[in-house]
Amino acid sequence: MARSLLTVPLLLTVTAAALAWLVLGPAAALAFVALALLEIAMAADSSVPMAGIAGRLHSPARRLFLSLGIVAGVLAMRLVLPPVAVVVGSAEDPTATVGEAVSAPGAFAAHLQEVRPGLAAFGAAFIWLVFAEYLFNTDRASRRSWLGRLEARLAAVARPRVWSLATATTGVVLTTVLVGAADGWSGAAVLPVLVGGAAGVGAYLGSKRLATWALHGGGATGTDTASVGTGPGAWRVHVYASTVVFERGLVVFMLFEILDGVYSLSGAGVLGADGLGALGQAAVGAAAIGVGALFLARLTAHLDEAAGLKRLRYLKAGAAYVLGVLSVLLWTSLLVPIPGALVGWFGTVVIGLALTSSLPWRAWVRRARLRVRSA
């Protein structure tokens, strides 16, 4: 099964690498392979929460989400959102910004770094609120706690949405105060963090409001979409799907572009392929993102078909805690640098622990003991 999942992405990787070798040279091919493998590794982490999203959708919205929505969402967030962020954050000319992103990715990455504090604050608040849906169990779903009594108590608090907003607001205010204290209360440092955090909370509430409108308009009475997708208002489910694609796309954007600090279209230069030129680096980065997005869609579809989240009961919890750790790292990065190794591996470690704890170790040990006794 793993072979079938990897066949198309690996074939594309090999084909694109060969084409890059012929057109741009061996440095471009090696840079593309390295970036593509990194994208595939990150897609393996993201596939778990994506499968959870797919499980909340009804056909045909689920089919659209798994086939086209994931790929389009990832590409849009990785390739379109950075120029939009620079335009909004620094009032640059949109046409010039897009041109710079393609023709001068190094210079564009510097401009993206200038607006990073506001973006990191935005992402931290937004992603924390998405994580808080699990932490405080806003849907009141029946589940087994992964981390024991404390998690169970947090999942049973009264008014979970109030707790979600209160904790997010606390994070925004605390980070703003710490950034201000470290920078001598310079408005240039404090204002982007405060405005970005408030915008993140507002964007989350707006996204949820849009999702609720789409579901209620389609005939649902809550977050369950099982009864939606077959009537004349089925298009509203696709609106709902777009909100969850936006959530996951924003997470990937924050992890790669903001927390890691490397602009995707200039990633080839980071790997030692500076001789490619700006357009060559942009082409290599965009192609690697496309390979990762395709692999993410295929792996998510496999998890959804195999009901992997139901059989491996703690994977959903692990995916949620990846979001929680990411939001904390984004807030922390406004105060101190985050090591690259931590950025690259924390998701893999959390998902790995969730997977390991989901396996039926006790049953396997019991069977082994019975075999030894019977022998």
Image (cartoon, helix red, strand yellow):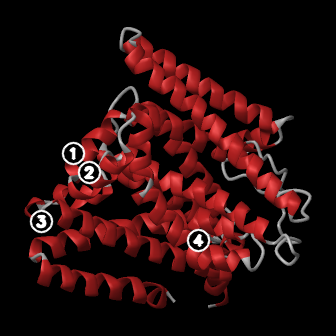
Image position, residue 244 (x, y; %)? 65, 59
Q: Is residue 56 visible?
A: no
**Distance from label 4 to label 1 (Cα)?**
31 Å
Horizontally, residue 57 falls left or right of residue 302, namely right
Residue designated by label 2: 100
Q: Are marks 4 and 1 in contact (CB under 8 Å)?
A: no
Most foreground residue, 361 or 325: 325
Say which mark, if any, is on residue 276: 3
User: Dot 4 surroundings within 10 Å: few (below 14), some, or many (20 or more)?
Assistant: many
Between discs 4 and 2, the one toward the N terminus: 4
Residue designated by label 4: 69
**Distance from label 2 to label 1 (Cα)?**
7 Å
**Distance from label 3 to label 2 (Cα)?**
16 Å
Q: Are marks 4 and 3 in contact (CB under 8 Å)?
A: no
- Residue found at x 26% / y 51%: 100
Q: Secondary structure at mark 3?
A: helix
Most foreground residue, 81 or 135: 81
Q: Are marks 2 and 1 in contact (CB under 8 Å)?
A: yes
